[in-house]
Amino acid sequence: MVISIQVLREVTNNFSDENILGKGGFGTVYKGELDDGTKIAVKRMQSEMVGDKGLNEFKSEIAVLTKVRHRHLVALHGYCLEDNEKLLVYEYMPQGTLSQHLFDWKDDGSKPLEWKRRLSIALDVARGVEYLH
């Protein structure tokens, strides 16, 4: 589903710092909420990271990800390719990222995950990867 840049600017408060969920090598992820109440995570790609080849790969990835549905994979709800912006719109995961739970648990005062839980997560990740292949 194509989502306009105007809508994504509105639901992220113009990509405000207060809505940042995280930053990575390819861009910044923002929290937003659509008019129907659906919470979303908007990945805003750094424009310098996406050249002509990258744009073709981005479009191919969208074509694949819009068809992928699996309980161990975050769903892609939509995308935006407008005004030199390249954004992916995913379902929002309210409990945080896997990385936060595995490596950054001290940051929010949590306890480390028990090894039994870590093994369960590893198996779920493997099931998601298996589905993709």
Image (cartoon, grey):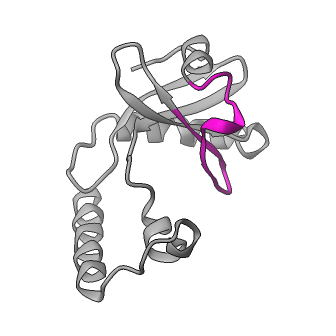
Identify the image quadrant of residue 9.
Answer: top right
Between 50 and 107, the one lying in front of the other is 107
Quarter in which the N terminus is drawn: top left
Q: Residue at x 38, y 54 (%)?
A: 95
Report the magenta residues as a range.
12-31
Q: Residue at x 59, y 23 (%)?
A: 81
**Where residue 22 sits: x, y (%)?**
60, 51
Q: Residue 27 colored magenta?
A: yes
- The residue positioned farthest toward the right in the image shown: 48
Q: In the figure, is residue 2 to the left or right of 8?
A: left
**Where residue 61 sits: x, y (%)?**
46, 42
Q: In the figure, is residue 50 to the left or right of 88?
A: right
Q: Residue at x 30, y 84 (%)?
A: 114
- The residue positioned farthest toward the bottom in the image shown: 115
Q: Residue at x 28, y 36 (%)?
A: 67
Q: Residue 17 colored magenta?
A: yes
Identify the image quadrant of residue 111.
Answer: bottom left
Q: In the figure, is residue 36 to the left or right of 84?
A: left
Quarter in which the C terminus is drawn: bottom left
**Where residue 56 sits: x, y (%)?**
58, 37
83 to 15, vertically: above or below: above
**Where residue 131 sits: x, y (%)?**
22, 59
